[in-house]
Amino acid sequence: MEPVSRREFMAAAAVPIVARRGRPEPAGPQGDGGMFVCMHGATGSMHDFRTAMEGWARAGIRAVEPDLPNVRRFAEAESPRMARTLLDDLGLRAVSSSNQLFLEESGPRRAQSIEDLRWKVELAEIIGADRLVIPSAAGQPHTIDDYPEVIDNLREAADIAAPHGVTLMVEFTRLSTLINNLRTALRVVREADHPNLGVMMDTFHFWSGMSKFEDLDRIAHGELHHLHFEDVPEEPPLEVFGQPDRVFPGEGIAPLARIVEVLKSKGYAGPASLEMFSPAIQAMDPYDQAVRARETIEPLIAS
């Protein structure tokens, strides 16, 4: 089948919201102002979009963070409208979407990154996601003189997202050479000062990277837009472990309960989104992934 055109994506943006089917004991937005379990598309990346969504919904999940390339493959086989309808029929809400790299760093990769961002914010709008994660993946050496350009780059990207009602969320990552800690993420987002730009946090990058626990105090009330929620293993050593070494919350050494307590005091009442890269976890049946997510996350985020 031919790839879905941008015009087709836009035409489908007005998909009517289908009434969500009631399900027992859902793990999702309940209107009580608390945190809730969310499943990140990376966790189900070894499964097609429909299989992952159906399995997660069957386990009582109500909030998802779809991987947009995976959604696009589904849309090319079915239609963008069907992607939204599938979520609605399953009682799932796209509370975020993932992701777009190389937007903050100038260089040869940025032009393609901008083009990819254009179709991703269009598709995010169609499926009802008002947020998109933009991790910092800078790898070249940088100096303080490069940060004004970082600010300009982020503003340009946010301008592209704005007409679609999508907020871009800067994610600091532990190995980035531009934004690798919470302090810097807060700084660049505040300096950019754009209504469609926010800051998010991943507990794996927070606890295994350059951030300090006290940096959480720097977050203003209501400033945190989104949270990826995983644990950091005690082994292997920090110097040699990577993304696939993430473990389920409560199975590692990060002080997740203390982190949750501080974030709640800062007014955070959003998703705790499980983003896992272990091939063994990604290969699990999506239902089992979601059951395990609820078992490990819900006790930590309970009021």
Image: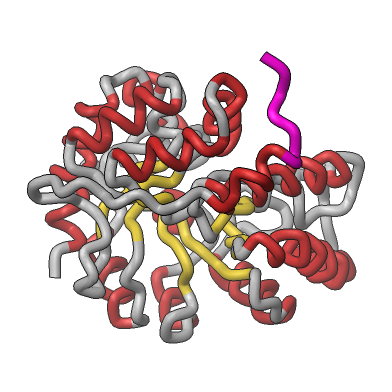
The correct choice, above or below, for 285 with respect to 146 in the image is above
Extreme bottom residue here? 221
The correct choice, above or below, for 48 with respect to 204 in the image is above
The location of residue 157, given as percent across then percent down, is 76, 60
Extreme top residue here? 1
Question: Which residue is located at x 31 percent, y 71 percent?
Answer: 269
Q: Is residue 111 visible?
A: yes
Q: Is residue 230 visible?
A: no
Magenta-drawn stretch contains 18: no
Question: Which residue is located at x 14 percent, y 64 percent?
Answer: 302
The location of residue 88, given as percent across then percent down, is 35, 45
The location of residue 115, given as percent across then percent down, is 81, 43
Question: Which residue is located at x 59 percent, y 31 percent?
Answer: 72
Prevalent SS, magenta region:
loop
Question: Which residue is located at x 76 percent, y 52 percent?
Answer: 103
Q: Is residue 3 left or right of residue 18?
A: right
Q: Is residue 210 left or right of residue 296?
A: right
Front in this rendered view, residue 248 or 211: 248
Front in this rendered view, residue 77 or 161: 77
In the image, the segment drawn in magenta is: 1-7
Q: Is residue 32 left or right of residue 18?
A: left
Magenta-drawn stretch contains 2: yes
The C terminus is located in which quarter?
A: bottom left
The location of residue 243, given as percent across then percent down, is 48, 35
Front in this rendered view, residue 203 or 210: 203
